[in-house]
Image (tube, rainbow, N blue to C red):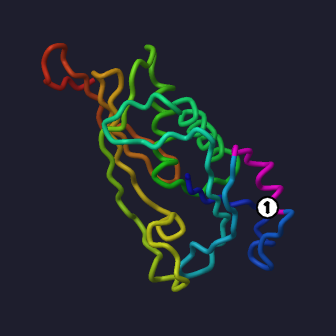
């Protein structure tokens, strides 16, 4: 499951006043077109002044759980297409933040778009989350401390091994910005890293 936060200007007044209706839920599902949306609700992520956004939990048939160090074969197309969809949502649909799985999907899509050679193997070899905000205790509403509604702003450091010889170290912000920290190539026959 991927957790995302969306700011929708068309529904902003309604969210601030009476909240989302069942018709609004249907409209949101149609607008964002994920295969399966598990839940939609309006949440406040503003610890001082209220800042209401739409929280969605998105799942998909055939999603493969990522295991550190294991090649991502099954479900790679899903991860890449989801990353592409999230990227376009940041540009035009008011996407506010993605969780760690959303950041991984965006990172995989980023690498695929950057690659000029065929992808034979790709694996997530390491990940680290830096919490930039934690609203768990500030909001006082019993929210899950590990949910994106408690930690809407994070930096994910991801290490991805591509084709068994290229290592990408990426910084992915929960707001969709991606930076390459380093890209290394493993020299043939040696385990020396050559900066690319």
Query: Magenta includes 66?
Result: no
Which residue shows up at 43% across the image and 69% down it? 133
Where residue 180 sits: x, y (%)? 37, 37
* Looking at the image, residue 163 lies above or below residue 5: above
* Residue closer to the observer: 140 or 16: 140
* Residue closer to the observer: 158 or 22: 22
* Residue reaching furthest to the right: 23
* Looking at the image, residue 143 lies above or below residue 103: below
* Looking at the image, residue 186 lies above or below residue 127: above
* Residue assigned mark 1: 25
Quarter placement of the C terminus: top left
Q: Is residue 73 left or right of residue 190?
A: right
Where residue 139 sits: x, y (%)? 52, 82
Q: Quadrant of residue 158?
A: top left
Q: Is residue 43 left or right of residue 30?
A: left
Q: Quadrant of residue 167?
A: top left
Please state the extent of the stretch shown in magenta in the rendering.
24-35
Which residue shows up at 43% across the image and 19% down it? 119
* Residue closer to the observer: 122 or 193: 122
Where residue 154 sits: x, y (%)? 43, 59
Classify mark 1: helix, strand or loop: helix
* Residue closer to the observer: 36 or 151: 36
Secondary structure mostly seen in the magenta stretch? helix
User: What is the tally of numbered marks visible in this picture?
Assistant: 1
Q: Dot 1 surroundings within 10 Å: few (below 14), some, or many (20 or more)?
A: some
Q: Is residue 178 left or right of residue 161?
A: right
Q: Is residue 101 left or right of residue 23?
A: left
Where residue 33 sits: x, y (%)? 74, 44
């Amino acid at each position: 499951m991927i957790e995302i936060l969306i700011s929708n200007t068309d529904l902003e007044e309604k969210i601030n006043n009476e909240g989302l209706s069942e018709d609004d839920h249907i409209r949101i599902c149609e607008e964002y077109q994920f295969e399966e949306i598990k839940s939609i609700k309006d949440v406040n992520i503003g610890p001082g002044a209220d800042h209401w956004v739409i929280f969605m939990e998105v799942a998909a048939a055939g999603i493969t759980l990522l295991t550190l160090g294991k090649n991502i074969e099954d479900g790679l197309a899903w991860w890449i297409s989801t990353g592409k969809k999230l990227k376009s949502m940041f540009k035009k649909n008011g996407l506010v933040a993605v969780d760690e799985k959303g950041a991984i999907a965006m990172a995989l899509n980023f690498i695929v778009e950057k690659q000029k050679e065929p992808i034979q193997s790709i694996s997530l070899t390491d990940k680290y989350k830096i919490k930039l905000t934690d609203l768990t205790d500030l909001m006082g509403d019993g929210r899950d401390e590990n949910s994106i509604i408690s930690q809407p702003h994070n930096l994910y450091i991801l290490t991805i091994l591509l084709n068994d010889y290229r290592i990408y170290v990426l910084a992915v912000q929960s707001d969709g910005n991606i930076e390459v920290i380093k890209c290394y190539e493993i020299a043939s026959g040696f385990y020396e890293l050559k900066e690319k």
